[in-house]
Image (cartoon, rainbow, N blue to C red):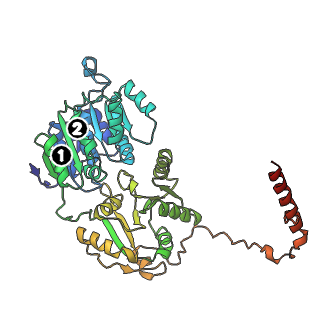
């Protein structure tokens, strides 16, 4: 079944059949009324129906499944806990494709679940098994994890899946793209007592539909779409595409970072090397930049995200590992320093801004050798931006369209002066005979004769 977006009504969370503790937690974190995807999913999910939720990135899918699973958990602070037969075993499993999304979803659920004593655990690779195993042994109600680590813990007998009654697949299309679909199928097969399954995705490829038909029970397919917003990305994102020269990109980027009203910004690169070099260049120019890419350990990646959220840095340079899972309020700009590989990557990159009803700006640099790739992205998404305007860091239209103050130099601090080192060749020429390192020809011959004589005697 499918449902279409209903007319907008002034529905609030307080009007929904939710526990007082859940409504209190929602209000405490500033959530008063549901977004479209939440408004449509919640009545079905709260009635224990299977749901396929399809909505654009940044429209609030996490709460759409987070609220129903929290409502159905039997928690240590609930009166039902005393007679609950499987205390401490996971009741809810949320499967996500990336580590960053795992930590973000866990945080969002914890904010709503703590006041009932619900224990939530994030499990993902790149971290030691022992703390995760200890937490599982102590007892948890909700587990959020990536497919590989979930299966590893299940094979070890540490993660008990048989009592999981509610399972959520978040960003299912990304799990398909990353090759996790076989692992997801194993997880679904190992949860025989599921009473509810929810699947959320920005797009709905054929393999995901086949998965839903195999493992879900008459799911209701909900797809939200504003009548005024028919594009692949939300219309609150102001998109700019500029044809840029590789040697001038860092200058253009630095000037954009000096734009009026520019807040926390994510800069996306395709390669780890470009990512690190771009961050280093920005630091040298005086910007508060940090980086996330695959060569960094999990601890360093998490610290970079914490610093970015806390405002210690306001520019995060990242590879596509961060395109999913970063849900940070107030990101004003997303800059594609290198053109994305395809239209899906483009949508998920720029979806880091204009989240939850806010506005945002997305800027994409397209080098000469990337024009063909960009035209395919433009055609697939019907953006109407097939011919990027040739732009340089000194182009007047760059300053105009992005509200960059005239005279911006792309530097927050002055460049370090170049220190001229006098060449040693200007010193007095060294005499050959004065060098103790050069042996005289006669000495070389004598040493050779001695070694030859000893060899013959031996």
Report the front residue among 362 and 25.
Answer: 362
Q: Residue at x 32, y 41 (%)?
A: 147
Q: Does any portion of residue 112 appear in the rendered image?
A: no
* Count of number-bearing discs: 2
Left or right of 88 in this view: 279: right
SS assignment at label 2: helix
Q: Where does residue 237 sit, x and y in percent of width and height?
A: 31, 65
How busy is the neighbourhood of tag 2: few (under 14 within 10 Å), some, or many (20 plus)? some
Label placed on residue 211:
1
Report the front residue among 17 and 287.
Answer: 287
Residue 85 figure quarter: top left
How busy is the neighbourhood of tag 1: few (under 14 within 10 Å), some, or many (20 plus)? some
Q: Where does residue 418 sit, x and y in percent of width and height?
A: 69, 72
Left or right of 336 in this view: 449: right
* Residue furthest right in the image: 434
Say whether marks 2 and 1 touch (CB < 8 Å): yes
Residue 149 figure quarter: top left
SS assignment at label 1: helix
Q: Where does residue 154 sit, x and y in percent of width and height?
A: 32, 32
How far apart, in angstroms, are the residues tagged by discs 2 and 1? Answer: 10 Å
Which one is earlier in the sequence, the residue at label 2 or at label 1?
2
Judging by the rendered image, the residue that carries numbered circle 2 is 188
Report the front residue among 178 and 335.
Answer: 178
Left or right of 313 in this view: 163: left
Q: Residue at x 39, y 57 (%)?
A: 320
* Residue furthest left in the image: 1
Q: Where does residue 206 sit, x and y in percent of width and height?
A: 17, 54
Q: Residue at x 29, y 41 (%)?
A: 95
């Amino acid at each position: 079944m499918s449902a279409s977006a209903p007319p907008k009504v002034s529905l609030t969370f307080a009007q929904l059949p939710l526990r007082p503790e859940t409504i209190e937690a929602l209000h405490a974190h500033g959530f008063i009324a549901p977004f479209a995807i939440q408004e449509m999913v919640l009545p079905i999910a709260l009635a224990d129906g299977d749901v396929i939720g399809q909505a654009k990135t940044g429209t609030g899918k996490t709460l759409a499944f987070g609220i129903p699973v929290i409502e159905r958990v039997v928690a240590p602070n609930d009166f039902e806990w005393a007679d609950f037969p499987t205390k401490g075993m996971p009741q809810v499993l949320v499967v996500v494709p990336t580590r960053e999304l795992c930590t973000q979803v866990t945080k969002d659920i914890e904010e709503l679940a703590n006041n009932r004593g619900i224990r939530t655990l994030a499990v993902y690779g790149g971290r030691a098994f022992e703390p995760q195993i200890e937490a599982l042994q102590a007892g948890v109600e909700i587990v959020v994890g990536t497919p590989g680590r979930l299966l590893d813990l299940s094979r070890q007998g540490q993660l008990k899946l048989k009592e999981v009654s509610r399972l959520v697949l978040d960003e299912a299309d990304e799990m398909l793209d990353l090759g996790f679909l076989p692992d997801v199928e194993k997880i679904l097969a190992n949860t025989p007592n599921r009473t509810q399954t929810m699947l959320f995705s920005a797009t709905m490829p054929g393999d995901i539909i086949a998965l839903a038909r195999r493992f879900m029970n008459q799911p209701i397919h909900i797809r939200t779409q504003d009548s005024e917003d028919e594009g692949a990305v939300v219309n609150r994102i102001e998109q700019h595409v500029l044809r840029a020269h590789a040697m001038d990109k860092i200058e253009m980027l630095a000037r954009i970072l000096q734009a009026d009203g520019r807040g926390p910004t994510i800069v996306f690169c395709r390669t780890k090397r470009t990512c690190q070099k771009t961050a280093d260049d920005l630091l040298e120019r005086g910007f508060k930049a940090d980086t996330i890419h695959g060569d960094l350990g999990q601890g360093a990646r998490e610290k970079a995200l914490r610093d970015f959220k806390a405002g210690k840095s306001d520019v995060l340079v990242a590879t596509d590992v961060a395109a999913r899972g970063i849900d940070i309020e107030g990101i004003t700009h997303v800059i594609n320093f290198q053109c994305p590989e395809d239209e899906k990557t483009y949508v998920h990159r720029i979806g880091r801004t204009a989240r939850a009803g806010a506005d945002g700006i997305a800027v994409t640099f397209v080098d000469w050798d990337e024009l063909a790739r960009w035209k395919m992205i433009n055609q697939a998404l019907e953006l109407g931006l097939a011919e990027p305007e040739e732009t340089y860091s000194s182009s007047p239209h760059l300053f105009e369209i992005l509200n960059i103050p005239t005279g911006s130099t792309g530097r927050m601090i002055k460049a370090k002066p170049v220190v001229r080192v006098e060449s040693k060749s200007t010193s007095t020429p060294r005499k050959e005979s004065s060098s103790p390192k050069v042996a005289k020809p006669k000495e070389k011959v004598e040493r050779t004769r001695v070694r030859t004589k000893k060899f013959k005697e031996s």
